[in-house]
Image: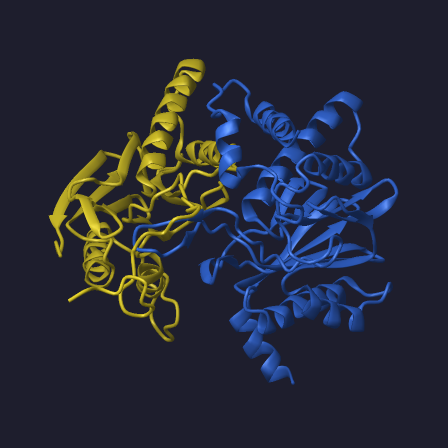
Chain colours: A yellow, B blue
Amino acid sequence: MFQHFGDPGKMKDYHYTGPVEHKFSPYAFNGGTVLAVAGEDFAIVASDTRLSEGYSIHSRDSPKCYKLTDTTVLGCSGFHGDCLTLTKIIDARLKMYKHSNNKTMTSGAIAAMLSTILYSRRFFPYYVYNIIGGLDEEGKGAVYSFDPVGSYQRDTYKAGGSASAMLQPLLDNQIGFKNMEGVEHVPLTKDKAVQLVKDVFISAAERDVYTGDALRICVITKEGINEETIPLRKD
Amino acid sequence: MLLVHHTFSKMALASVLSGDSADFSFDSSQSFAFGGGPGPSGLGLEGTPGDSLSFSVKNPLCVGDDDGVERKIEFLHGTTTLAFKFQHGVIVAVDSRATAGSYIASQTVKKVIEINPYLLGTMAGGAADCSFWERLLARQCRIYELRNKERISVAAASKLLANMVYQYKGMGLSMGTMVCGWDKRGPGLYYVDSEGNRVCGDLFAVGSGSMYAYGVMDSGVRHDLTVEEACELGRRAIYQATYRDAYSGGQVNLYHVHSEGWTRISQDDVLVLHHQYKDQA
């Protein structure tokens, strides 16, 4: 039997000879979800610990909460490379402030500074979704949420990262009492808030492929920062 | 040539931001290659220059991914803001929704920036662009006050802002703002945007919901309105815009600028206003 090489429709060669367009992107999407809740005298910052890229999981133990000061924790998700660089820069700036002004930066000041750090890269942004959780100067819980180029505002609660669109409506309902009529607005206690955060992340792990493995919760009170790790779905 | 211009502009931005901080900017040639520099003209805004800003900015920064899904880095956009002059000063009314693509990132954004006790700036377009440049404007206004021992005029403040952003024209900034205040010439209202427009006027509406707001405002505005009537007009105009524009919503924040400065009049949730107007009709 002889093969018909030139026969159209039967056997095709798989060589493509010609210019090929390669695309290099400086960014990657590493997944992960971050959440922060502010209470009367506490703040909670929580994140999952899965680091993924495409269909792979790079690590099951890569938390996205970074302790900045004794009263402030930063959660960042998005592109892990930019998260690392950004946290290094923030740490350096915190030290510089401490040395020049002989005091630790307050949560509000860190938020304002982060806004200008992010905006300095307006034309080649840090691909990071940041949420800062901490205590303000009066000891009340504060949450500041950012967009990748530095727009920020103070909130009571915020979800960021890959499952944010799933979690935010749930928080709106449970903490903000939105879309509920005739319900008493009970202020959130610390234990209830921690339980809510755990439930919310379990839901996120069910429906978002980039969220899972474990949940790291940082609870910030005037006594200090208490960290807790609980397992989530690993699939 | 383009590279040099970009380097210069990046340095301008960097010099504005450095203070006592170290210079963490990367080599600018690196960012130029990835579309960070000036692209084809009109990279930022859709529509003709001077057109009302629909603020659906095409994002040049896309994230390629292994699973083939192109994830855009979403900035916050979409809004309705308005301001108009009348006999007792200037009324400024804004909504409070911020969107990132089709996701509503926040319903409680403060789109009126309090530059100083007698000057207000509104925010439409890129949230970070507006808040950053208006914060810088506040700093410049304060420096003017210290140097000249007198308050800055609305015309001068708006000119400072316009000149600041003109250097970045074509680079993708998205900002449509109204500078409102009261100076020795009386009430002042200027519209400034990132395309380089700066116009003085008696009434403006800016943002994706501006057309709806214009309809309501134009049919009700008169020079001899009372403060109450003017506030209600501004409130109603924003409410109607939030009703029809998907990218506007949340709350209506109302300010009144008068000879003593500005006053925050009210903050009303759009859902509550809806029931109120329904019962009225």
Judged left or right of residue B243, residue A126 is left
Rendered-image quadrant of the C terminus of chain B: bottom right
Asked if residue A159 is positioned above or below residue A22 in the image, the reply reads below
Camera-side residue of A13 and B8: A13
Asked if residue B255 is positioned above or below residue A93 in the image, the reply reads below
Q: Residue at x 23, y 34 (%)?
A: A223
Q: Where is residue A235 in the image (x, y as percent from the top left)?
A: 13, 57
Rendered-image quadrant of the N terminus of chain B: top right
Asked if residue A207 is positioned above or below residue A224 in the image, the reply reads below
Specify the farthest residue to the front: A1
Judged left or right of residue A203, residue A76 is right
Q: Residue at x 20, y 49 (%)?
A: A56
Q: How many marks?
A: 0
Q: Can residue B232 be seen in this view?
A: no
Q: Where is residue A1 in the image (x, y as percent from the top left)?
A: 15, 67
Q: Where is residue A114 in the image (x, y as percent from the top left)?
A: 44, 34
Name the quadrant containing residue A67: top left
Camera-side residue of B117 and B30: B30
Q: Can residue B138 be seen in this view?
A: yes
Camera-side residue of B22 and A121: A121
Name the quadrant containing residue A185: bottom left
Name the quadrant containing residue B146: top right
Q: Where is residue A19 in the image (x, y as percent from the top left)?
A: 44, 46
Judged left or right of residue A205, residue A131 is right
